[in-house]
Each structure stands twice: as C-alpha cells, then as structure tokens.
Image (cartoon, rainbow, N blue to C red):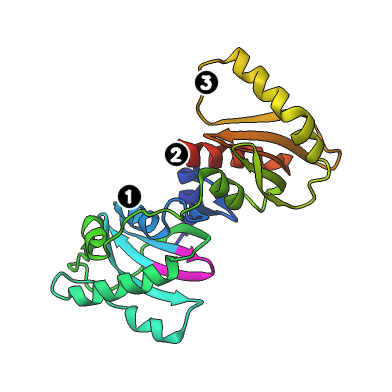
Amino acid sequence: MTDHSLLVTRLMALAANDSVFVGGARVLSRAGLPAPLTAIITEIDATVLARTLVCDIDGAVLRMAVAGRRLRGLIDIGGVAPAATALTGRVLAQDDIATTKTLGVFLAGLCKDAQQVTVRSHPAEPLGNPSEAGIPAASLAGLWQVVDHGTGQSRMAQFLAGNSPMITAFIHATAGVTTGTQGDTTKLDPIWRDQFMAFRKRQQAIFAHQDGPLLVCLDGGLDDGRAVAIAMTGDEASVFAYESAAISTILTSWHRITH
C-alpha cells in the first residue's frame, strides 16, 4: 500500500500560505501562540476525512485517530511517562465522558508551558469499530474548558521568542526603554542608537496615519549571512538580526502574531 503522507503534507503546504513547517511537520503553536490545546482542537475540527494526526508537543508524540471533525481516540503516545498509556487504544464515547475529561486534563498538562506544537497528517489506522464516532471537536472544547488565555507575553515578545532559532540577536524596547536583549548585539547597538529614531521620524512623516504593526528589512547585511530588520507594534519596537534564508518564515510569523 502506498503511503500518501508526503503528498498530503505537500498539498497542505500549498493550501495554507500562512503555515510554517519544521522538518516536514506543520507548526500549530509556537511560544504559546495560539494556545496549544486550542490549536490541537482546531486541527481536529478541520479534519473531515479519516486520518491519523501525529502531534508533537515539545517531544511528547501523540498519534490521534480523527475523522468527521471528531477525535475518535489516542492510538499511542511516546515520550511521556508509561502511566499515560492507559488513555490509549480505545474510542472515546458519549456515554463515557469521564475518560474524555481525563484525557483533557492530561493534554492540558502537556500543553501548559509548551513552546512548540507540530502536526503531521498520516493515513488512518484502525481503532475500535467503524461505528464508534468519537467526540466532536466542539464538545471537546466544552468538556476541556478550553480558553485561549495566551501566554501573558506581549506580541513582540511572542514574536521574538517564537522565532528564536532564526533570530540570532535582538534589542527589544517598550516606550523607548530597552526591556530585553539577546545574543551579540554589538552590531545592532549603533543601529538602535543612531538610526532607529531617525527612521521612525521619517516613516511617520511619510506615512502619517500608519499606526499598525510594521516590519522593515534594512538594506545591507552583516557580512555573515545574516540581515537586520526593525519591527514595531504599539509602543514596542525591536531591532534584530536574522538568518537571511528564513525571511519568509519570519514574515509569516509576524503577520500571524500581529494581525
């Protein structure tokens, strides 16, 4: 039997222009945005045909049987304590809500401080009887009392943290006061000190009514394969160095977080 997983992944990539992929897996949540458990339920709700969704939650790998926008159950779990396997291998049922709630508590614990959640869509695997439908995504949200609280971080902080593999150094400021730095900022310091305010005044003079989020890539690089950009949203600003090849991923992340 042909494994169509690679084809499915490629089709999903083409269909979702704002998606980010890591090692072939699509990123559902990064640095707590959107809320990891909410993102997983949303993915279940978007799955109509019978599939096996393989979710990686900071190294804990869950294979879930999903069909008809319903979670049928967990096939197996890897990377967690053996005790968690008691939740695998059975179809969730409306007359056994206690099991669904227990699963929700388990997933909430995994997702609480998760920095990255990814998903792969694989062919469906047998679980229970075909007549056992599982629990609708809408019901899961209610049973698990899912609320998108976010992480408490500002949008700029979420952006910088979520793209840390690609952003090698940054200066982060709020209301003109530096609130955080990371990496070697030696080459960023003069840009922040001598160029940022001049750029900001020029930008405001040209675009007097533009007050939304803004990310601008500066001309020239750092002679080591990296480039520099300025980002602004609300009263926050940052100057950061990034891997030039990652610009499309960074721009996608910026748009997702700030819009």
Query: Which SS class for mark 1?
Result: loop
Residue 156 found in image quarter: top right
Q: Secondary structure at mark 3?
A: loop
- Which quadrant would the N terminus be assigned to in this image? bottom left
Q: Nearer the viewer, residue 51 or 173?
A: 173
- Magenta-drawn segment: 55-63
Q: Position of residue 81 (x, y in %)?
A: 46, 83
Q: Which amino acid lies under the numbered mark 1 shown in the image of this protein?
A: Ala
Looking at the image, can residue 210 be seen? Answer: yes
Q: In the displayed structure, would residue 178 be above or below residue 131?
A: above
- Residue furthest out toward the top: 206
Residue 91 visible in the picture? no
Nearer the viewer's eye, disc 3 or disc 2?
3
- Look at label 3 and name its amino acid: Gln
For disc 3, the marked residue is 210
How much space separates mark 2 and mark 1, taking CA atoms?
13 Å
Crowding at dot 1, Cα within 10 Å, few <14 / some 14-19 / many 20+, comes out as some
**Number of numbered tags placed on the structure image:** 3
Q: CA distance from mark 3 to mark 2?
A: 31 Å
Q: Which residue is mark 2?
A: 15
The residue wearing badge 1 is: 46
